[in-house]
Amino acid sequence: MHVSHKMKSAQSINNLPDVLSSSAYGNRPYCGGGWLTDRTEAQETPNYTCVSKAAPWRPSTHFGSARLPHCDERWTRGMGPVVNLITETAKLYELEGLVVPSIYSAARNALYTRYTPVDWLRSHKLHLTHSDQARQLGEKLRADTIRLGQEADDRVRRAQEEVSKLLGDRINDVYFLRNSLLEETDAMVDEKNRLLESKRALEKCLSETENPLHITQECLYHREKRQAIDLVHDDPERSLLREINIIKECQDNMKHLVDKATAQYSLCRAIQHELEKDSADKFQAMQLDQTAHQLKSSSAGLALHLGVEKIDQRMSVPEKWAEHTAANLKRSQAERASSRKIREEIDHLLNSVSMRMRESWAMSSSAIAKRAQETTEARNQLQVQLTKVTQELFDVEKNMESLKKCIESKRGPLQLAQTRLEVRRRRPNMELCRDDPHGRECLSDTRGGRAAGNNRSADAPTGNHAIWTSRLTACSQSD
């Protein structure tokens, strides 16, 4: 009964951790009712430091549980039941198969947690010493705190007075720079409006150059309708081409200046936006600084803002702040100077374009009038020549008719001579001799007369064609 009671208590869930803490003996030889374990071997150190290991009341040996690699039924029946660790309450899977010894003293653990009187006295004196040191430190801390509070109050008061003075100076600086920005903004708006008017005048002049250019090109297109030799590269054509080049050159200059004025107008708008943004920021900053300048320690709405004293990377320094405003003013002045220069260029270009186009128009008109007079004189001469050519053409046609009749009269003798030659060509063997009757002289005369007639007949159409060409040319030029 005594052994069974111990086994039940050892198998309880509350005692399982103690079993685990004492199960560090490995596989040891079995001796009697348990495994003998020496206290000098490796085991878990108890949770105390003040008890000497050589205490006479500390046991040198005790029984412990261990895991066996092999256990037969005879040993299992002799030692009692095996702890079932695969349960919902224990869930200690590492202790599966653990055999609980028959004798296990739970009261032995109390011996390992006791202290000696020397330890108790030492702990009491240590507590008293610590309390005295804490009390002295508290008295010193109270004195330092009072002194630091008074010094902090003085520093805060002086800092508030200095900050108020600096805020007043800052408000004056912001007010002065804001007025400068507003004056520069007004000047920029006026200059921008003037530039826009000059640009519109230039664009209107550019559109009006299209009509003279169209007229000049139409003149060249009509002159391309000339025929043959009349397609001459004369002074009127050179004058018209020169006028077209001048007009296109003026248009290119005006387009370039329009683009330049447009870009300058965009720059003026950009700097105006920067000036307005800077002045608006300064106005808002001035209002905020005035509000901050009027605040006091007794003002309503004061609150703690944690981390507000940390420097933000986006904040500027006074030097950069002043340089930013000065750079905006300087850039605005430079852009206004560039705008005035562009307006002067526009005025000069308008005068130059007007003068050059009038001169080229006058030169082209004079050259065309002179060429028209020359063409009229040539036409009168061609009409006189046309009458003569028409008469000569009539005479040539009569001559061609008589020449055809002469050629036709030579056809019979030529046929006779050729027939005789064909008949004598049939002579046999040696009789086929090139003798005097061969008729070379007679055939040559016949051929010569017919050839001369044919040549004359061939020359007659050529001459007739030349006369007809001259007549047509005279007619076309006279028209």
Image (tube, grey):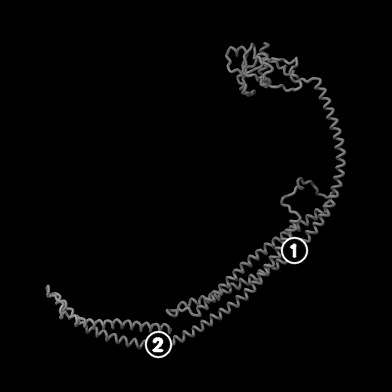
The image shows residue 188, relative to residue 244, as above or below, that is: above
Q: Residue 115: percent from the left, percent from the top? A: 78, 20
Q: CA distance from mark 2 to mark 1?
A: 86 Å
Secondary element type, mark 1 = helix
Residue located 52% across and 78% down the image? 239
CA neighbours of label 2 inside 10 A, class few (<14), some (14 to 19), many (20+) = some
| Of the image marks 2 and 1, the number of the one nearer the N terminus | 1
Residue located 64% across and 70% down the image? 199
Of residue 213 and residue 44, the one placed in the foreground of this image is: 44
Which quadrant, please, contains the N terminus?
top right
Whether residues under marks 2 and 1 lie with C-beta atoms below 8 angstroms apart, the answer is no
Q: Residue 291: percent from the left, percent from the top? A: 80, 54
Label 2 or label 1, whichever lies nearer to me, is 2
Of residue 447 and residue 240, the one placed in the foreground of this image is: 447
Secondary element type, mark 2 = helix
Q: On the image, numbered disc 1 is attached to which residue?
A: 182
- In the image, what residue type sits under mark 1? Leu
Residue located 56% across and 78% down the image? 360
The image shows residue 333, relative to residue 293, as above or below, that is: below
CA neighbours of label 1 inside 10 A, class few (<14), some (14 to 19), many (20+) = some
The image shows residue 103, relative to residue 451, as above or below, that is: above
The image shows residue 423, relative to residue 40, as above or below, that is: below
Q: Label for residue 369?
A: none
- In the image, what residue type sits under mark 2? Gln
User: Based on the displayed image, in which of its 4 quarters is residue 106 positioned?
Assistant: top right
Q: On the image, numbered disc 2 is attached to which residue?
A: 385
Q: Residue 7: percent from the left, percent from the top? A: 66, 15
Residue 466 is left or right of residue 110, and the answer is left
Which quadrant, please, contains the C terminus?
bottom left
Residue 238 is left or right of residue 385, and the answer is right
Q: Residue 459: percent from the left, percent from the top? A: 31, 82
